[in-house]
Amino acid sequence: MSCLRLRRSLDNCKNFSWAERWDTKSIEKFAFTGSTLAGRKITEASAKSNLKKVTLGELGGISLTIVFDDADLEQAVGDPFSPKTFQDPQINQQQHDRIMRYIGYGKADGAKVRYGGHRVCHEGYYISPTIFTETKPNIEIALEEIFGHVCVMGRF
């Protein structure tokens, strides 16, 4: 048994779709953690192919992050273009646009962009890791799972 993790790097900003490889006979199982919508599509693809085994990890939900007063936010994020930094792009234009919409919602709702909040790399679907502060618990970015390199921080 072997495991394959697909990723793209900043050196290769080309689009890749896992759906193109779904019918490969050498793939026996597909494990996924991510959005509920993508989980449904994976389950549908399994049903339409050779009924590959599918494990769906955490789907949906909000990613809570607790950051204390002495945290160094600049050090925590790092430089996305440094060879020491690992960052995958978004899977496609639709997901890229969805995340950018959420970043726009956060700005419109008065949250402060502490870091990032913009596209990086002219090819591919890279978005700078983004940190929002000064958020309120009832704004959209605090209520919805964004599924991107976005951290929404609020006081408790």
Image (spheres, rainbow, N blue to C red):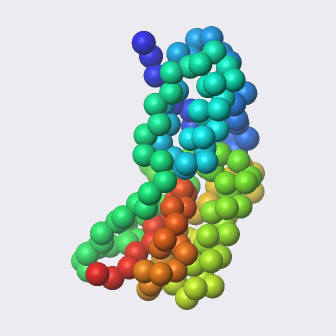
Residue 24, given in percent of the width and then of the height, sits at: 65, 16
Q: Is residue 36 left or right of residue 11?
A: left
Residue 103: name its quadrant. Answer: bottom right
Q: Residue at x 38, y 79 (%)?
A: 154
Residue 3, given in percent of the width and then of the height, sits at: 46, 22
Whether residue 127 is situated above or below residue 27 in the rendered picture? below
Q: Residue furthest bottom?
A: 110
Whether residue 96 is situated above or below residue 27 in the rendered picture? below
Confirm whether residue 125 shows in the render: yes
Q: Residue at x 55, y 48 (%)?
A: 36
Q: Is residue 150 left or right of residue 57?
A: right
Whether residue 98 is situated above or below residue 73 in the rendered picture? above
Residue 140: name its quadrant. Answer: bottom right
Number of callouts: 0
75 or 140, which lies in front? 140
Residue 91, given in percent of the width and then of the height, sits at: 65, 45
Confirm whether residue 115 shows in the render: no
Q: Residue at x 53, y 16 (%)?
A: 28
85 or 62, which lies in front? 62
